[in-house]
Image (cartoon, rainbow, N blue to C red):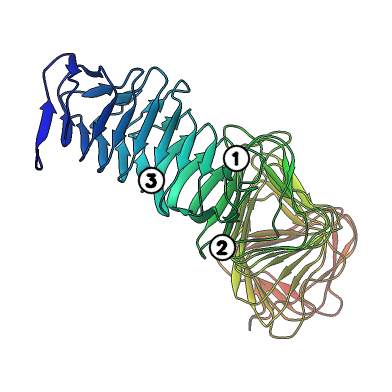
């Protein structure tokens, strides 16, 4: 009666009596078993303190909660503290809050939510293996490590909004009404290749921060050409279906050793936020692939993958720097690379060869901070105007006959600088643009004649390795 609450808190198993309840609370050690269908006029609270693991077992009976439901645990025990071993329905009319590693069995006929909720595992995952229906009211669901492993139905002309959450859908998600709507306003993971909402509407980028994540295994062609945020995980190759723009961030991530790949094919790709490609090394590693077209990285780009090579077909454009690491292997980028728009830095690790041209444009300053001695540039390094500047503050093995930065400025006098003219053939040696002018450390190696284009001073170590020779060309090279 009124706002009364009945609490089952015996330190041991108990049966929940077949009574009419307003509010029901479950505490204490042991399981509390339903012995009949149960409808609560008010709220349900299942709370496991740090010293116990209160557990409510519905067995084969239906449970309906008209008020709110709160299922909380204080530990990460597998299975959480709520269960239903047999068939029957669970209907949550008020908001549902779960913070527990519950496994909702596939034996359950179905779960129905009418006012959404906040769902999360506790140091693990919340697994829902039975069908789930969202009905009656437009509602919001938030979650962390929540796996919907069966069908999800949005029933009626309502809107379900998923917010700032890590929710995984491994079953088909659909509506049963043309006005059924699913909004992705957070971080939504699709574990199945079937696009949600064959009936109804899927607003996959309902907000500017919406991220859609493809985590299933197998090859797949992306159905959209605009994304807010995009994540690629799982095995197989996910391929663009047209010129594509990502408003936020792109992540291609090795998920469960999935070796995920995003293939641009012949299409253009623009990423306005950051780009992160994370592999684990070895053959067939995760990667961002392209046959032709232009990939524009507006935000910072980080690629740690043994699948980092590009043929000559595409063009790469960086606007806020790049970190490139072939993850213990080697990589060759044979296409042209453009650094544009903003002053920026690039660095590489391992054995990286830039076989295409590196072109600066927009009056920018590009700094190379590579510490690894495996960096080789066999293409031309050049600017597009006299105000483009290349600053070498790391290591560079330049192997092109044409001198670097014929257009623009070259600075190589930083303390960490080592510049190598290492082509097996003749090369022109650029006179840097600093007042000295000079190199901090300079090595002439490979073979052929290395010809000065102006006076050069070497402030640190100067090395001339035979059979390479120096042609002063009327200028001087000093090493004080």
Q: Residue at x 25, y 43 (%)?
A: 67
Q: Is residue 226 placed above or below 79 in the rendered structure?
A: below
Residue, disc 2 = 248
Q: Secondary structure at mark 2?
A: loop
Q: Residue at x 40, y 42 (%)?
A: 144
Kindly report the distance in space between the C-alpha atoms of the residues bearing marks 3 and 1: 28 Å
Q: How many marks?
A: 3
Q: Is residue 401 placed above or below 171 in the rendered structure?
A: below
Position of 204 with respect to 379 (left or right) is: left
Depth order, front residue of 97/246: 97
For marks 2 and 3, give the one nearer the viewer: 3
Depth order, front residue of 209/438: 209
Kindly report the distance in space between the C-alpha atoms of the residues bearing marks 2 and 3: 32 Å
Q: Residues within 10 Å of mark 2 (few under 14, many from 20)?
A: many
**Labels 1 & 2 near each other (Cβ < 8 A):** no
Circle on res. 114: 3
Kindly report the distance in space between the C-alpha atoms of the residues bearing marks 1 and 2: 18 Å
Circle on res. 17: none
Q: Residues within 10 Å of mark 1 (few under 14, many from 20)?
A: many
- The x, y position of residue 441, in whole percent, is 65, 63
Q: Quadrant of residue 40?
A: top left
Residue, disc 1 = 215
Position of 431 with respect to 185 (left or right) is: right
Depth order, front residue of 59/358: 59
Q: Secondary structure at mark 3?
A: loop
- The x, y position of residue 168, in whole percent, is 51, 40
* Rendered-image quadrant of the N terminus: top left
Q: Residue at x 11, y 19 (%)?
A: 10
Q: Is residue 207 visible?
A: yes
For marks 3 and 1, give the one nearer the viewer: 3
Sequence-wise, the earlier of marks 2 and 3 is 3
């Amino acid at each position: 009666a009124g706002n009364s609450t009945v609490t089952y808190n015996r330190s041991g198993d108990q049966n929940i009596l077949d009574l009419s309840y307003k509010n029901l609370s479950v505490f204490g050690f042991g399981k509390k078993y339903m012995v009949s269908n149960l409808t609560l006029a008010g709220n349900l609270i299942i709370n496991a303190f740090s010293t116990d693991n209160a557990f409510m077992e519905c067995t084969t009976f239906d449970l309906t909660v008209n008020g709110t439901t709160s299922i909380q645990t204080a530990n990460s025990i597998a299975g959480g503290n709520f269960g239903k071993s047999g068939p029957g329905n669970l209907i949550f009319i008020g908001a549902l809050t779960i913070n527990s590693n519950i496994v909702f069995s596939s034996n359950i006929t179905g779960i129905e939510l009418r006012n959404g909720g906040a769902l999360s595992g506790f140091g693990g995952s919340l697994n829902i293996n039975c069908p789930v229906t969202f009905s009656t009211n437009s509602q919001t669901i938030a979650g962390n490590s929540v796996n919907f492993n069966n069908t999800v139905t949005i029933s009626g002309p309502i809107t379900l909004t998923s917010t700032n959450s890590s929710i995984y859908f491994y079953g088909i998600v659909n509506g049963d009404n043309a006005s059924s709507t699913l909004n992705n306003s957070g971080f939504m993971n699709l574990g199945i290749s079937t696009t949600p909402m064959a009936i109804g509407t899927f607003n996959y980028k309902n907000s500017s921060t919406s991220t859609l994540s493809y985590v299933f295994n197998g090859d797949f062609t992306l159905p959209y050409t605009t994304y807010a945020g995009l994540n690629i995980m799982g095995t197989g190759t996910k391929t663009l279906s047209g010129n594509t723009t990502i408003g936020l961030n792109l992540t291609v991530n090795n998920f469960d050793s999935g070796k995920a790949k995003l293939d641009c094919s012949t299409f253009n790709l623009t990423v306005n936020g950051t780009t992160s490609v994370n592999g684990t090394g070895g053959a067939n590693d995760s990667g961002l692939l392209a046959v032709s077209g232009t990939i524009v990285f507006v935000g910072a780009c980080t690629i740690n993958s043994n699948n980092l090579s590009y043929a000559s077909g595409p063009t790469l454009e960086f606007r806020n720097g790049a970190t490139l690491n072939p993850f213990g292997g080697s990589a060759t980028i044979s296409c042209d690379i453009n650094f544009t728009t903003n002053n920026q830095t690039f660095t590489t690790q391992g054995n990286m060869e830039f076989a295409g041209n590196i072109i600066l444009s927009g009056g920018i300053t590009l700094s190379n901070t590579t510490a690894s001695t495996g960096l080789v540039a066999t293409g031309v390094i050049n600017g597009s105007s006299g105000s483009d500047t290349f600053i070498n503050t790391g290591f560079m093995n330049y192997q092109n006959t044409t001198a670097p930065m014929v257009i623009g400025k070259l600075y190589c006098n930083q303390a960490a600088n080592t510049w190598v003219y290492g082509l097996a053939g003749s090369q022109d040696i650029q006179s840097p643009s600093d007042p000295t002018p000079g190199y901090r450390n300079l090595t002439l190696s490979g073979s052929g004649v290395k010809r000065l284009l102006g006076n050069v001073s070497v402030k640190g170590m100067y090395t001339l390795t035979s059979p390479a020779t120096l042609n002063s060309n009327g200028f001087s090279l000093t090493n004080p």
